Image: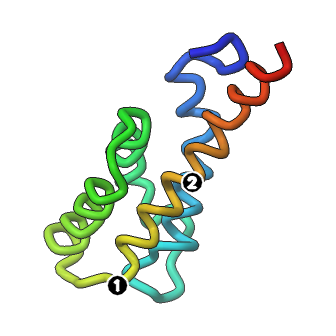
Amino acid sequence: MSASHPPANDRFREYSGELNLLLWAVWNPIGSDLPLSEYERYVPTLWRMLEDDSSIDAIAAELTRICQEAMEIEASTNGSTAETLKRWWSWRFEYPEQLTAEAE
């Protein structure tokens, strides 16, 4: 990790809310007027997957598993949500490092 990023725990505390908001805004398999905190229990697992550079397919499979096992519903947005989460992670954590490396 570059010096431009805080330690992993601090980074989670600082940015996990963004991931939670993405789940609520993009995934939202329940699809009704829910509080913003509805999906925050899934953030740590998805965060670890993103941090470990899991594939879009693996993340989509986890979202599908959550829908089936925890919510007992089907969601049509698992694949597109996984793509969005990967893009967010890249934009939030990888792209700034690329810019820093290019500037040096």
What residue does disc 2 label?
87
Up the image or down, 57 lies above or below 75; here it is: above
The residue shown at (69%, 11%) is 3
The residue shown at (47%, 88%) is 32
What residue does disc 1 label?
76
The residue shown at (53%, 73%) is 26
Amino acid type of the residue that numbered disc 1 sits on in the rendered structure: Ser
The residue shown at (31%, 82%) is 75
**Between tags 2 and 1, which lies in front?**
2
Specify how the rendered protein is coloured. Answer: rainbow
> Which badge, 2 or 1, comes first in the chain's sequence?
1
Q: Secondary structure at mark 1?
A: loop
Is residue 81 toward the left or the right of residue 52 in the image?
right
Up the image or down, 15 lies above or below 68; here it is: above
Q: Give residue 54's mark.
A: none
Farthest-out residue, bottom: 32
The percent position of residue 57, horizontal first and vertical second, equals 29, 59
Is residue 31 toward the left or the right of residue 15 in the image?
left
Amino acid type of the residue that numbered disc 2 sits on in the rendered structure: Arg
Q: Nearer the viewer, residue 52 or 103?
A: 103
Is residue 36 toward the left or the right of residue 102 in the image?
left
Up the image or down, 20 lies above or below 103; here it is: below
The percent position of residue 68, horizontal first and vertical second, equals 17, 74
User: In the picture, residue 1 is in which quadrant?
Assistant: top right
Q: Secondary structure at mark 2?
A: helix
Q: Nearer the viewer, residue 23 or 55?
A: 55
